[in-house]
């Protein structure tokens, strides 16, 4: 199959990741739970992953690197663990439901209020964006947090994180959803003033499904969502009062952590190359698509490799199904768990088709997609 659904899950993993996961699956020891040599060896690799991620994202210490099963869990941990009654939150219409649904639940529970920053500019061809001035205009005296994506999972647009951080008062916490951006371009927590960063390990970071991360600064002290065994302070019926143990109840997925370690090491040496390749591939596709009427593009070239488009006579999900069943091509149709961006783009009724390329794809593969779309353009 021609795989262009990398924004959902990276379709191909580096060989070093596959080798590491295969080796980890042969190990039965539980890291951090026993004192024998095999358990300690596994725990050492888990700790090495914390060090590597802390350095890769310019974090605030390995102890503030917490493993989760996905980015949604990391976002829930960040939002429910930090926000208090009476807080106000600013988010944007570009956000995934992993941000929007927790905020909506907290709002309906009477805990917080939140405002959604709209897009500025032309919605088509990827020209709309979130601006620092628009974020600043929503700040209230009780604003506690700004929650914003590093890159839109629908159109690939990248908000100006550093400028947005500078546009709001220093006391306001800054949460970045790095699900789509991580592994595609540099995200530096200290440099961008990010207090909470959430990661999906199975996308641009080349890990396997079941790998997620929350990194956070010394300005926040998240409270646990889960309670249970940690392998530390077992005599106490309370959760440990230190990180990461306070936020990591239960056994970690050792294969997922190891995959993320090797994925991060891979990204360290190829980040610029990956960004350039994905930028080039998305530009290649979008340029040629613009010459195939009646398709309309909603993305511009981007380092995440995301290209969203629609056919006026075929629903996005039907077009994606035809590409899969007839041409053996994997793309995604629909709303992509981000309804507000579709409302802003005027595509809420039908969504968009999203082709998302990785550095493992080629222009020859994209030509197959373009040929199929040319045939279907007459529909």
Image (cartoon, rainbow, N blue to C red):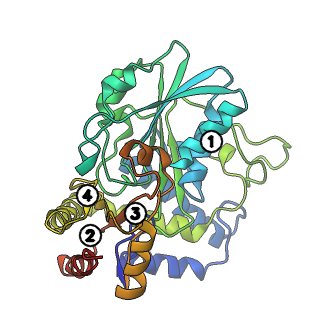
User: Which one is closest to the eye, mark 4 or mark 1?
Assistant: 4
Residue 243 shows in the view = no
Percent x, y for residue 325?
43, 85
Is 246 on the left or on the right of 258, as rendered? right
Judging by the rendered image, the residue that carries numbered circle 3 is: 7
Q: Secondary structure at mark 2?
A: loop
- Closer to the chain start, of discs 3 and 1, is 3
Percent x, y for residue 236?
84, 43
Measured along the vertical axis of the image, is residue 203 above or below residue 367? above
Q: How many marks?
A: 4
- Closer to the chain start, of discs 3 and 4, is 3
Q: Residue at x 53, y 68 (%)?
A: 209
Measured along the vertical axis of the image, is residue 37 above or below residue 249? below
For the residues bearing labels 3 and 1, Cβ distance under 8 angstroms? no
Distance CA(mark 2)–CA(mark 4): 21 Å
Measured along the vertical axis of the image, is residue 191 above or below residue 320? above
Distance CA(mark 3)–CA(mark 2): 12 Å
How many neighbours does mark 2 have within 10 angstroms: few (below 14), some (14-19), or many (20 or more)? many
């Amino acid at each position: 199959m021609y795989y262009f659904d990398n924004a959902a899950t990276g379709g191909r993993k580096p060989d070093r990741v596959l080798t590491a996961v295969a080796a980890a699956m042969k190990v039965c020891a539980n890291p951090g739970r026993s004192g024998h040599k095999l358990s300690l060896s596994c725990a050492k690799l888990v700790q090495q992953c914390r060090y590597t991620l802390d350095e890769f994202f310019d974090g605030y210490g390995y102890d503030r690197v917490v493993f989760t099963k996905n980015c949604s869990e990391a976002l829930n941990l960040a939002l429910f663990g930090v926000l208090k009654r009476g807080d106000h939150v600013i988010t944007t219409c570009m956000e995934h439901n992993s941000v929007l649904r927790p905020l909506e639940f907290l709002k309906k529970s009477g805990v917080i209020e939140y405002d959604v920053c709209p897009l500025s500019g032309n919605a088509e061809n990827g020209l709309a964006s979130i601006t620092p001035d628009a974020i600043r205009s929503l700040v209230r005296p009780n604003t506690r947090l700004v929650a914003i994506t590093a890159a839109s999972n629908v159109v690939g647009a990248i908000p100006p994180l550093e400028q947005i951080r500078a546009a709001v008062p220093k006391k306001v916490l800054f949460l970045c959803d790095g699900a789509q951006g991580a592994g595609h371009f540099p995200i530096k927590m200290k440099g961008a003033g990010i207090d909470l960063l959430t990661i999906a390990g199975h996308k641009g970071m080349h890990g396997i499904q079941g790998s997620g991360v929350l990194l956070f600064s010394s300005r926040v002290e998240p409270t646990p969502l889960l309670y249970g065994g940690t392998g530390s302070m077992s005599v106490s019926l309370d959760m440990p009062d230190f990180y990461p143990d306070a936020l990591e109840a239960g056994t970690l997925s050792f294969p997922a952590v190891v995959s993320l370690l090797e994925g991060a090491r891979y990204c360290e040496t190829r980040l610029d190359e990956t960004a350039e390749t994905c930028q080039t591939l998305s530009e290649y596709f979008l340029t040629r698509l613009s010459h195939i009427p009646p398709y309309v593009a909603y993305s511009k070239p981007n380092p995440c490799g995301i290209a969203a488009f629609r056919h006026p006579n075929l629903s996005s999900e039907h077009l994606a199904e035809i590409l899969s069943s007839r041409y053996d091509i994997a793309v995604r149709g629909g709303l992509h768990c981000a309804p507000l961006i579709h409302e802003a783009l005027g595509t809420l009724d039908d969504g968009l088709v999203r082709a998302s390329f990785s550095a493992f794809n080629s222009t020859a593969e994209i030509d197959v997609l373009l040929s199929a779309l040319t045939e279907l353009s007459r529909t």
